[in-house]
Amino acid sequence: MTRQQIGAWRVIWRDTTAITGNGLNTQWICRCQCGTVRSIRGDILRQAASMSCGCMDRLQAMKYESKVRDDEQYDWVWSE
């Protein structure tokens, strides 16, 4: 899995410090495109259940808020 890109995550190396119980859920150290580094379970990565550290969600929210603000700015033009 090392060096794979999964969403915004880049898998760096296997996390040898993580306790995985039965050994089935190996953890991987991953770096998000924004620079955040986290240990993520392998099954979560394989299922693409985590695509970023949350920075992508914040980016999408900012884009949506910006669009709503732009739409509201021109509402007065059409209401007359």
Image (cartoon, grey):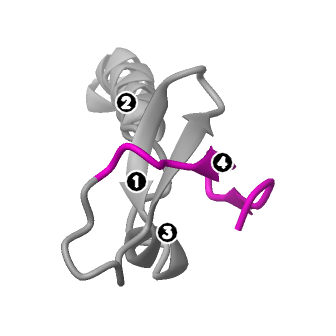
Question: Residue flagged by tag 1: what amino acid is it?
Answer: Ile
Q: Earlier in the sequence, mark 4 or mark 3?
A: 4
Mark closest to the chain's N terminus, 1 or 2: 1
Indicate the secondary structure of the residue bearing disc 1: strand
Q: Is residue 75 above or below residue 9?
A: above
Q: CA distance from mark 2 to mark 3?
A: 20 Å
Say if residue 7 shows up in the picture.
yes
Q: Residue at 44% of width from left, 21% of height from top?
A: 70
Residue 33, how many percent across, how many down?
65, 31
Q: What residue range appears in magenta?
A: 1-18
Residue 14 highlighted magenta (yes or no): yes
- Earlier in the chain: of badge 4 and badge 2, it is 4
* Image-based side of 25 in relation to 5, left or right: left
The residue to which callout 1 is attached is 40
Q: Based on the displayed image, in which of its 4 quarters is residue 49 positioned?
A: bottom left
Q: Is residue 55 magenta?
A: no
Q: Find disc 3 in the rendering and name its residue.
A: 45
Toward the viewer: 20 or 51?
A: 20
Crowding at dot 4, Cα within 10 Å, few <14 / some 14-19 / many 20+, comes out as: some
Q: For residue 13, which numbered disc appears in the image?
A: 4
**Mark 2: amino acid:** Arg
User: x%, y% of residue 42?
Assistant: 46, 70
Kindly identify the amino acid type of the residue bearing the numbered disc 3.
Leu
Q: Marks 1 and 3: CB-CB under 8 Å? A: yes
Nearer the camera: disc 4 or disc 2 = 4
User: Which residue in the protein does label 2 denote?
Assistant: 58
Dot 2 or dot 3: first in sequence order is 3
Dot 1 alpha-carbon crowd within 10 angstroms: few under 14, some 14 to 19, many 20 or more = many
